[in-house]
Amino acid sequence: MLPGLKTAWASVGSRNRVLTLAGPGAVVSYPLMHMAATGALSGMVEGLRFRLWQSPDQLRTLLVNGDVDFSATPSTLPALLHNRGMPVRLVNISVWGILWLVGTDPAVQSFEDLAGRELLVPFQRDLPAVLLDTLLETHAARGLAPVRLRRTRDGQDAIALMLNGQAEQVLLVEPMASLLLWRAEQSQGQAGVPRLYRGQSLETAWRSAFPAQPSLPQAGVMAAPSVAADTALQRAVADAYAHSAQWCAEHPADCAALVREHLPQMPQAAIERAVRGTRLDCRAAQAARPEIEALYRLLASRFPQAIGGGLPPADFYAA
């Protein structure tokens, strides 16, 4: 058990509580923002608020201090926390596609078209990096020329290199891919700024390369230790999240306007494009367990640090 964790991890009465929802500035968080804005769960809790976090380390601190009840998260982080002694639960998986190729050559549509070319990658030893390496290994096994990976510090560095014409292809998560495309469109006519095109998603390429394991459960919602035993509340949050995710998918412009209240630095048009380009498909963690465990096994064999070693137990997956 991690030191410093509050002892009140057992379920507590929630009707008179204001629950804190949290998440990064990614599409997986947008339904939580909508839930807070529309007063979801009004019959179960006093209210909801949304809190933005900037890094997994910040989220860990919020969890240790008991400052978060539910959070949007990459699918690997709850497993890592649970395996390190923090009794979080995975509530659902909602995002199955967030990685996109963006490039200067409209003829480069697929990952196969990258053979022999350079690709900017703002990832190190995390989930996107492992997925990309695994996919490219299948291409090498088929005799395709290797892709030269050029690592950048983060997505903003990769965007700057692309806009300055210092790179031709990049792999980005949403909403960064949409932000790059929007910035390029706004800068057309300026010297040195290339025209950019959206290529294939990694998830589409993955389905072709691994037909027996076609799904990539990349992000969802987890329950913090403070509510890990409250299965009724978890189901209510999952239902409300699914409703809000459907609203976001059906009203991307309105969703983008709402999201911009939390992310004022992001252009509304880029947020809307990111919503349109992300597959939001909410499934309870227990229902998605086979796909999640297939991904965890892949990571355990290649990068076990990403999930803290082995697979979490059965009660990690909420029904």
Image (tube, rainbow, N blue to C red):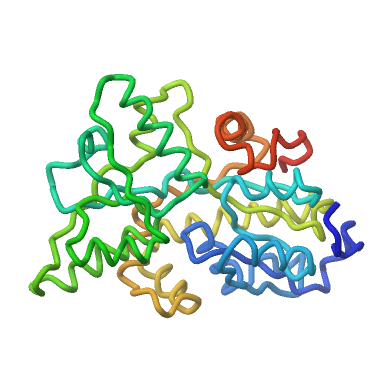
> Is 132 positioned to the left or the right of 179 in the image?
right
Relative image position of residue 257 (x, y in whole percent): 41, 75
Give left or right: position of 269 versus 27. left
Taking the image as shown, residue 82 lies to the left or right of residue 297, namely right
Above or below residue 305? Residue 12 is below
Q: Is residue 194 above or below residue 128?
A: below
Position of residue 266 relative to residue 145, above or below, is below
Q: Quadrant of residue 152?
A: bottom left
Q: Position of residue 306 (x, y in %)?
A: 61, 43
Q: Position of residue 302 (x, y in %)?
A: 55, 32
Residue 102 in the image: state x and y as whole percent: 25, 52
Q: Residue at x 27, y 32 (%)?
A: 146
Quarter containing the C terminus: top right
Q: Residue at x 62, y 53 (%)?
A: 221
Residue placed most toward the observer, 88 or 241: 88
Quadrant of residue 116 within the rendered picture: top left
> In screen coordinates, is 17 left or right of 210?
right
Looking at the image, which residue is at 17% across and 42% down?
A: 108
